[in-house]
Amino acid sequence: MGRPTVTDIAREAGVSLATVDRVLNARPGVRDKTIAAVNEAVARLGYVRDMAAANLARGRILRVAILLPDTESQFLQTLQDALQQAATLASSARMQVELLRFPAKDMHSLAMMLADLAAGGISGVALMAPETPVVRDALRALHAAGVPVVAMVSDLPNSGATHFVGIDSHAAGRTAGVLMGRFLGGKTPRVMVIAQSMLLRDSIERRRGFDAVMQRDFPGIEVGQTLETHGATETLQQVMAVSLAASGPVGGIYLLGSGHRALAQVLSELGLLGRVVTIGHELTPHTIAALEAGWMDAVIAQNVGHIARSTLRVLQAKADQQPINESQERLRLEIILRENLPPSL
């Protein structure tokens, strides 16, 4: 038997083609009993709708917005490049993607951008942002207006986000803990943890996972409090100097997020580059160079191309009220060492 069609649905449900069309497109004027009959016929026949063709037939253009902070992070630039490539491919399915940057230190500006998008009839929003109160309220307003929200890389569990695209950050932190404990061996049993901001959910979850493993499996290693840099090299220099002066030498450094270039500069100035176990996140031109040079020991990464494609697929499915293929959208974390760097990088 071939692929079921709307004609098969109409015959199975005992209704007209026009009625099937109204039900599939959620148009008014159909009795609940008839809607149920059509949906039951769809389920029995295993009908899967070609939404791209349906949108084309209706002349519908799906307009979505993706917002990223305006920092100079190499990871964010790599992610933006992947999103631009995915957006080009998605245009054939009549999806219009707007890539926007917001001031990383001004969450009120982000909230205003989100409000403007809602007022402009946007079909879906994806973003990577900290879950501050003002952002949370802006996203809840979008959700209340029926606009699906997808969190990328860093989850937004209390903001009404309808889906998260990214790796399990808690598992990533646990993985970093295992690597740190085993790599340290007999070296100085103290670890310094550095983050750009602990407002980001991914940093929070990574730290929790890291601590859980260190306390359980490596209780002899002292893990210091998180040193926040807020993206400033000068701040990183100051907090590291204060920490070293107060607590003595370190054997390992765990970098929860961005800031690899600044860390390399400061470690070099302190004479520690290549002398401490260093573990970070995300594969970028700089972390690749750091792995090759040997001063970074491991990078826990996620595939940015998968993030970009998954984000657009999820936004499409949400807008079309279609189910999401969870197995297809699930991202795996990758452990990258100098020895297993892909040849193309």
Image (cartoon, helix red, strand yellow):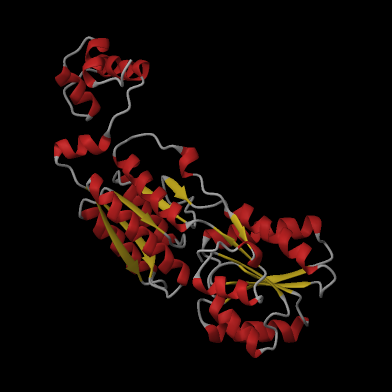
- The residue positioned farthest toward the front in the image shown: 343
Q: Position of residue 279 (x, y in %)?
A: 65, 68
Residue at 30% across / 59% down in the picture? 114
| Number of numbered markers | 0
Q: Quadrant of residue 293?
A: bottom right
Residue in the foreground of this view, choosing between 215 and 60: 60
At 51% from the left and 63% from the top, the residue drawn is: 200
Q: Position of residue 32 (x, y in %)?
A: 26, 18
Query: Residue 7: image x %, image y %?
Result: 21, 17
Q: Which residue is pictured at 64% across the width and 67% down the height?
A: 338
Q: Name the side, left or right, on which 311 lies relative to 30.
A: right
For residue 282, which quarter of the picture? Answer: bottom right
Residue closer to the observer: 139 or 92: 92
Up the image or down, 297 lies above or below 2; here it is: below
Q: Quadrant of the N terminus?
A: top left
x, y percent for residue 140:
37, 50
Q: Is residue 41 above or below residue 202?
A: above
Q: Is residue 210 left or right of residue 128?
A: right
- Where on the picture, by quarter, is residue 170? bottom right
In terms of depth relative to the viewer, which is nearer, 68 or 76?
76
- Please state if 308 lies on the left or on the right of 11 as rendered: right
Residue 135 in the figure: left or right of residue 199: left
Residue lying at 73% horizontally and 80% vertically, measured from the top left: 275
